[in-house]
Image (spheres, rainbow, N blue to C red):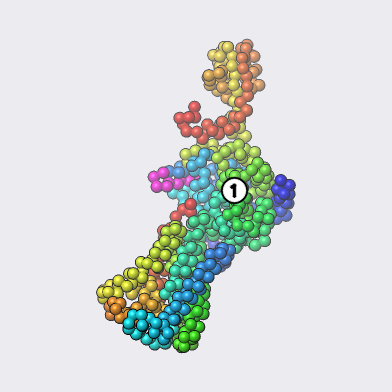
Amino acid sequence: MTARMTASMTASKTARETARKITPTPLTIDALTKVYGDVTALRDVSFSAAPGRVTGFLGPNGAGKTSTLRILLGLNRATAGDALVDGLRYRDLVSPAHRVGGSLSSDVFHPARSGRNHLLTIAIAAGIERARVDAVLEQVGLTDAGHRAVGGYSLGMRQRLGLASALLGDPDALVLDEPINGLDPDGIRWMRGLLRALAAEGRTVLLSSHVLSEVQQTVDDVVVIRHGRIVFDGTLSTLEAGTARVRVGAADSAGLADALTRAGATVERGDRGLRVCGIDVVRTGEVARDAGIALTHLSDEADGLESVFLALTADEGSAA
Amino acid sequence: MTARVAGATPRARAIAVGMGLTRSTAAEFVKVFSLKSWWLLALIMVIYVGLTAAGLAFFFSDVGAQLTGTASGAPAPRLDPVVTANLVYSSVTAVGLVIPLLFGALLATTEYRHGTLTPTVLAQPRRGLVLTAKGIVAALMGAVYGIVGLIGSVGFGAPVLAVLGEPTSLGEPEVTAVLLRTVVATALWSLLGLGLGALLTSQIAAIVIVLAFTQFVEPILRLVANVWEWSASLGRFLPGSATDALVGSGILSSMSALDPSVPSASVDALLWWQGGLVLAALVTVLLLAASLTTLRRDVE
C-alpha cells in the first residue's frame, strides 16, 4: 500500500523531470473497414482522439475495439480506410515508438524472460536509450519485480509492464487496450492518476474498455462502438446530459404526460409511472405543480450513464 | 525533429533501414541470451556429438575393427586415416544438425507462441527488417553451434583415436576443410529452421516436423533413394545429402563403403559448393515464402 503510493508519487515526479516538448499528436480513424473472412468486424469507423485529452473507446467485447487499435498501430491491415498517427500510418512514422506507445494485450511476454529484459529488447529495437528501461519500471512501480521472470507476474503486474513498454519511448500519444483489466482498486486509482497526468502534459491518450464505469472518472471524450459501428462520439458530459432521466408517478398519468411533453420532455410510459428524459427532476416537479397534478412518486435515476451506455451497446431486440 | 518524413530522401531512408537492422539484430541477440534454451541446446550439442564421435572413433580403430570383425565373422573394412578422421569429426553434421535447425525454428515460432511478435513489430514495424535481423542471428548462432559441435567431435573423437593408436589427422588440409565447412553447414541449417518456423508459425508443428524429418524421414529416404539410379540422382538434393556433399564427409554417404551389402546406385555426388548452393536455395525459398505469406498476416 505504502510502497504503491510512493511509487505513484515517484511516477509523477519522474514524469515531470523527463517532461519534454510534446508534439500534439492526434490519432485519427478515418472510414475504417475490416473484414475477416466473411465477418465484417469494422464498418466505416471514424473518430479521433485529441492531444491533451483522454479518450475512452468503449464497447462490448467483440465490438471491434481491439481490431481498430491494432490497425492503428500497424499490426493488422485495414480492408479499407485509414488509421493515422499525426497524419501518418504507424509504419511510415520515422521513430514510431517515440510518437505513439501501445500496449494491446497483457499476453505478449515470454514467461521465462524477466520484465526488465523484455523492456530492454523493445528499447534496443526501437532505438530508445537504455536508461528509459529503469525509468519506466520505476514509473509503473515494478522496480523490484523487474529482474523476475514474467511467468510469475500477476495480471495486474503484466498490465503495468505493458504500460511500461508503451511509455518506453516517452511518446506523444498512448494507445492502451483494456489497461484497467485485472487491476485492483488501488491499481485502478493509480492508473487513473497516471493517465490524467500524461494527458495534462499534452499527450493524446486513447484507451479501450468494455465497462464505462471503470473509465468514467478517467476519460474526457467517449467513443462507443457496437457491432463494428460507432454509435456515440462526444464528450463524457454530452453522454451524461443525454442520460438525465426522471421517474415520476401521478394518479392522472395521462395529464402529467401531456404537461411534460408540452414542457419539452420525452415521456415513456413504464409499469410504474412515467420515465422522463430531457428535463431534470426539479423541472419535472415544477411542471407537475404548474399543471396542478399531485404526484405519487418522483425520483432521479442517478445511474443513468451506465444504462445509456448499456442501451447504446445492447442489441436492438433488448434495447427497449 | 518532428517526424513527418515519410517522403524522405532515399539516402535518409537507407540510413533508417540500416540503423533499424542494426538495432533489431542487437535486440534479437538480447532475446536469445535472456533465455536458457540457447545454451541448453549447446550443451546437448557438445555431449550428443561428442559421444557419437567417440563411438565412431572406437568403431573405426584397429581395436574396434577386431571386435566388430570377430562378431560378424568378416574383418571390418579399413578406411584411409583421413577418411576415418573426417567421419569422426563430421559427427556434427551426421547427428547434430537437428540442434541448429531447432534453434532457428524456435527463433521464429517463439514470437508466435508467446505473443511477443506484437511488441517486436511495434518496436520495428518493417517486418522484412525483423526477419532479416533474425536471419543474421540465426546464421551467426548456427555457426556457433557448429563450433560447439566441433568442440564435441574433435574434443571427444581425437583423444579416442589417439589412445587407440590411430592418427588424428588434425592439420591435414582435407580435415581442416571439413571442419570449416561444418560451420557453414550448421549456419545454413539454422537458417533452414528459421525459414521453416517463420512459414509454419506453430511451435509444436515446427518441433514435430524438425524431429521427425531429421531423425526418421530423411535418413530413410536417403537409404531408399540409393537403391535405384533415378532416385539416387534426386536423393542427392535432399538437405542431408547436400550437407554431406558440402562438408565432404558423412556416415550415410559412406554407408556402402563401410558395408558392401548396403545398396548403392552409382551417381556422382554433388560437389561441395553444389551442396552448399542446394541448401542456400532451400533457405531462400523458405524465407521468401514466409515473407510473402505469414509475415504479411495480421499479428494476432
Q: Please give the chain letter of the residue carrying mark 1.
A: A
Q: Position of residue A121 (x, y in %)?
A: 58, 61
Q: Which residue is mark 1?
A: A155
Left or right of residue B180, residue A101 in this image: right
Q: Position of residue B16 (x, y in %)?
A: 55, 65
Q: Is residue B64 above or below residue B134?
A: below
Q: Is residue A252 above or below residue A111?
A: above
What's the residue at 66%, 51% (across, down)? A140
- Of A237 and B135, the residue lying toward us: B135
What's the residue at 56%, 42% (across, down)? A209
- Of B127 and A214, the residue lying toward us: A214
Left or right of residue A269, residue A157 in this image: right
Left or right of residue A194, residue B202 in this image: left
**Residue A35 falls inside the magenta stretch:** yes
Point out the stretch of residues depicted in magenta: A30-39
Task: Report whether residue B285 is seen.
Answer: no
What's the residue at 59%, 21% (across, down)? A247
Q: Residues within 10 Å of mark 1 (few under 14, many from 20)?
A: some
What's the residue at 53%, 20% (across, down)? A270
Please, what is the dominant secondary structure of the magenta stretch? strand
Question: Helix, strand or loop at disc 1?
Answer: helix
